[in-house]
């Protein structure tokens, strides 16, 4: 048994079922008039192209590409630039030049008209990231920090991102349903009954969640931080990627709100950011009737953070990081996740 799903976004609808268009016709059709010729296998959704692919292991998966949206966006930018006798950079091997720091840019401020143009370009890029272009997620996040006071150099940097997308327009994200192999010896379940912190050792479940149906999936996350990356404020940047089975479903890059004195601090706060999302995702899946019986397996590269959050006997020596420390450890104690 499994639950059937209907997803509506303005005038787009997706029905998820083995019965073809049953959900669209019999459920959504009760409330919304649907044209019969518009019902079929999905090929475009929210500006992205959908197609079914067969993987090397024989599994079938959906692939989602933003090439059509990127083509249209780049063409619009080039049309605008031609009116100003400009063009996109001819060579853009990366979204931003490696030595460019937007926070250090002291070029003249943009005029109100150009500032509005800059803001609209950031909006296009942010939607492109939503459509699966995780490869420009960090750069778009960095440039979004300057929406209030953009400068000429910022605008040129954004044009460089569009030039990069023009060259790499055919990126496609494959939602691979293959269940990953987990090395459980790395994600060992610790004995939290010896801890004096008094943790609840079972994960609290929503009282009004749907009856779980289907097989569920293995949830993984990969988290990292770039300490003191902002050269003006010395704030760090955190990022994580979340998978269901082998399908990436969420990617995030965010400048941290506090200044951390060490890489340990920035990595610990990044871990908290990731685990907050994981807790919300587990709740969401359960409310949709999807089983979440196994913990989420979270990978990081800071051994101090992994030891501090996983080993019950470890103690925190830095008081300022107490909230992140206790939040992540609580989830480990409840076997909500393992780091």
Image (cartoon, rainbow, N blue to C red):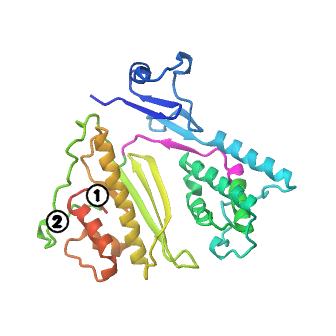
Label annotation for residue 152: none
- The picture places residue 275, in percent across and down from the top left corner, at 34, 60
Question: Is residue 136 depicted above or below 61 in this figure?
Answer: below
Numbered range of the magenta stretch: 164-179
- For the residue carrying disc 2, how many other residues have a C-alpha within 10 Å: few (<14), some (14-19), or many (20+)? some
Q: Nearer the viewer, mark 1 or mark 2?
A: 2
Alpha-carbon span between mark 1 and mark 2: 14 Å
- From where the camera sits, is residue 321 visible? yes
Is residue 173 highlighted in magenta? yes
Q: Quadrant of residue 215?
A: top left
The picture places residue 112, in percent across and down from the top left corner, at: 73, 62
Q: Is residue 18 magenta?
A: no
The residue positioned farthest toward the right in the image shown? 85
Q: Nearer the viewer, residue 281 or 217?
A: 281
Quadrant housing the N terminus: top left
Q: Is residue 220 above or below residue 17?
A: below
Task: Identify the residue under disc 2.
Answer: 199
The quadrant the C terminus occupies is bottom left
Mark 1 lies on a secondary structure that is strand
Secondary element under disc 2, as helix, strand or loop, is: loop
Residue 139 on image: x %, y %: 60, 62
Relative to the observer, which residue lies in front, 107 or 228? 107
Q: Residue, x 39% and y 76% (percent of image)?
A: 265
Upstream in the sequence, badge 1 or badge 2? 2
Q: Which residue is mark 1?
A: 337
The crowd level at tag 1 (other Cα within 10 Å; few <14, some 14-19, many 20+) is many
């Amino acid at each position: 048994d499994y639950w059937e799903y209907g997803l509506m976004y303005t005038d787009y609808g997706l029905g998820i079922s083995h019965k073809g268009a049953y959900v669209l016709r019999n459920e959504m059709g009760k409330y919304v008039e649907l044209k019969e010729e518009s019902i079929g296998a999905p090929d475009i959704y929210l500006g992205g192209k959908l197609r079914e692919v067969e993987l090397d292991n024989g599994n079938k998966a959906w692939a989602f590409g933003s090439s059509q949206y990127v083509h249209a966006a780049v063409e619009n930018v080039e049309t605008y630039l031609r009116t100003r006798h400009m063009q996109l950079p001819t060579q853009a091997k990366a979204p931003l030049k490696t030595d460019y720091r937007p926070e250090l840019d002291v070029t003249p401020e943009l005029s109100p008209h150009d500032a509005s143009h800059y803001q609209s370009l950031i909006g296009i890029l942010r939607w492109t990231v939503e459509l699966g272009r995780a490869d420009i997620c960090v750069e778009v996040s960095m440039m979004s920090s300057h929406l209030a006071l953009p400068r000429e150099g910022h605008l040129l940097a954004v044009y460089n991102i569009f030039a990069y997308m023009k060259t790499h327009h055919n990126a496609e994200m494959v939602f691979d349903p293959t269940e990953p192999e987990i090395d459980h010896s790395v994600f060992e379940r610790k004995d939290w009954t010896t801890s004096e912190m008094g943790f609840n050792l079972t994960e609290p479940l929503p009282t009004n969640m749907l009856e779980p149906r289907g097989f569920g999936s293995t949830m993984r996350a990969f988290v990292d931080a770039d300490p003191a990356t902002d050269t003006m404020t010395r704030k760090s940047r955190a990022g994580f990627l979340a998978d269901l089975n082998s399908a990436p479903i969420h990617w995030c890059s965010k400048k941290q709100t506090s200044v951390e004195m060490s890489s340990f601090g920035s990595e610990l706060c990044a871990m908290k950011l990731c685990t907050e999302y994981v807790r919300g995702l587990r709740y969401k899946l359960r409310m949709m009737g999807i089983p979440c019986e196994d913990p989420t397996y979270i990978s990081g590269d800071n051994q101090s953070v992994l030891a501090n959050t996983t080993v019950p006997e470890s103690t925190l020596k830095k008081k300022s990081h107490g909230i992140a420390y206790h939040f992540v450890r609580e989830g480990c104690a409840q076997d909500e996740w393992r780091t």
